[in-house]
Amino acid sequence: MASGGHHSDILIAGAIAAFTVDLLVYPLDTLKTRIQSPDYATLYTNTRTGTLNPGLFRGLYQGVGSVIVATLPSSGAFFTTYEHTKSILTRLNTTTSNTTIVPLPLLHATASSLAELVSCAILTPAEVIKQNAQMVSSGSPTNATLQTLSKFRSNPLALWRGYTALAGRNLPFTAMQFPMFERLKVAIREWRDARGKTRGGLVESAWITAVSAGSAGAVAAVVTTPIDVVKTRIMLGAVEHGAKPSEEGAVVDAQGKEATSVRGNGYRKKSGWQVGREIVDEKGFRGLWRGGALRGVWTFVGAGLYLGAYESGRVWLAARRGEVLDEEELV
C-alpha cells in the first residue's frame, strides 16, 4: 500500500503534468477540432480558391481555461485510480511462486480503462465547453468560454452530452497506449543496460518515459482517429441540446432567441453510429480520418510531456523527502 506521501505525489505530479501539456500543445488541439468540424470548409477555407482562411490559426487558446480547471482533478483521479488498480491487480496476479497468471499488458489495459472511465466523468463538461469555444469566431467581443457557457444555461445537463463518445474514444486509446508504453519503457531500459549506457538519474528517466509514452500515444491516436472525429461532431452538437423549446414550440437559446441548426443536424439526439454514418455520407471514409496526422503529432508531444513530467515529478517529490522510488512504483 502506498504511503500518504505517495498519494499526494500522484495528485501533485498528475496536476503538474496536465498543466504543462495543456499550455504547450493546446493550439494543436484547437487546430484538430477545427479541421474535424463539419463547418471546416465554410469557416476556414476560401470556398472559391480552396486556400486556408487565416482565421484557422486565430484564437488558438480559446477555451483553455475550462480545460485547466477540469484537467487537474481529472488527471489526479486518473492516476490515483490507475496506480491503485494496477497495484491491486498486480498483487492478485502474482502467485506464491512469483509467477504471473494474466499477461501484464492485459493487466495494464484493465487498470488504465477503469481509470479512464473515472476521469471522463469529470472531464466531459470541460471537453464540451472547450471544443465549442474553439469554434467561436476569434473576432467575437465576448469571451469564447463565457459565450459557450451561456448556451448551456437553460440545460446544464447537456454539458455531459458526449460522455459515452469521450469514453468510447479514450478507453481503446488508453487500453492500447499504456501496455505499449510499459513495454517500450522496459525495452529501452534493457537495451541501454545491455550496452552499459544506463546512467540513472532524473533526466534519463524522464526522456525514456517521454519517448515511450509519445511513441505509444501516437500509434494509439492514429488508430482511434475515427472515434475522435465522431466524438468531436457529437460535442460540437451539444450546444444544440443546450437549447430549450419556447412556449410556442420553437427552439430557443438561453437568451430566448430562436435557435436554428447551422449544421442541419436538427435537435434530435444521435448515436455515435449515426454520426459516423453521416460523416461517411458527407466525406466518404476519408472523412473519418480527418486530423489523424495532426492528432498523431499532437499526441506524441502531449503524451511524452504528460507522462514524462508526471513520472519525473513523482521521482523529484520523493527525492525531496529522501526516498527513492523503485521502478515498480512508477507508471
Image (tube, grey):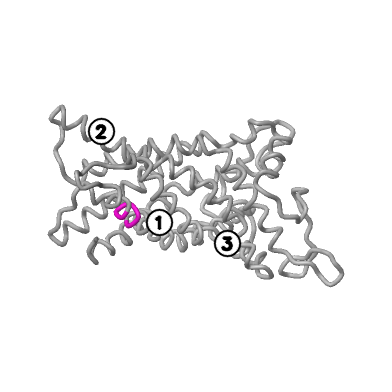
**On the image, which quarter does residue 267 sit in?**
bottom right
The image position of residue 12, as x and y in percent, is 31, 61
Position in image of residue 138 (x %, y %): 61, 53
Q: Nearer the viewer, mark 2 or mark 3?
A: 2
Mark 2 lies on a secondary structure that is helix
The quadrant of the image that shows the N terminus is: bottom left
Q: Amino acid at mark 3?
A: Thr
Residue at left 63%, top 30%?
A: 286
The residue type indicated by label 1 comes to: Phe
Visible in this render: residue 39? no
Q: Quadrant of residue 161?
A: bottom right
Residue at image point 31% right, 36% down: 183
The answer to whether 89 is drawn above or below residue 289 in the figure is: below
Q: Earlier in the sequence, mark 2 or mark 3?
A: 3
Q: Are marks 2 and 3 in contact (CB under 8 Å)?
A: no
Marks 2 and 3 sit apart, C-alpha to C-alpha, by 42 Å
Mark 3 to mark 1: distance in Å?
25 Å
In the displayed structure, does residue 202 sit left or right of residue 276?
left
Residue that mark 2 sits on = 188
- Which residue is more in the foreground, 34 or 84? 84
Our reading of the magenta stretch's main secondary structure is helix
Please tell me which residue is depicted at 36% across the width and 45% down the height of the picture.
108
Residue 97 vertical placement versus 292 (above, below): below
Question: As drawn, is 50 to the left or to the right of 307?
Answer: right
Q: Position of residue 194 (x, y in %)?
A: 16, 28
The crowding category of the residue bearing disc 3, from other C-alpha atoms within 10 Å (few below 14, some 14 to 19, many at least 20), is many
Q: Bounds of the magenta span?
A: 84-88
Image mark count: 3
As rendered, which of 290 and 104 lies closer to the eye? 104
- Return the mark for residue 78: 1
Of mark 3 and mark 1, the one earlier in the sequence is 1
Write down the residue under mark 3.
145
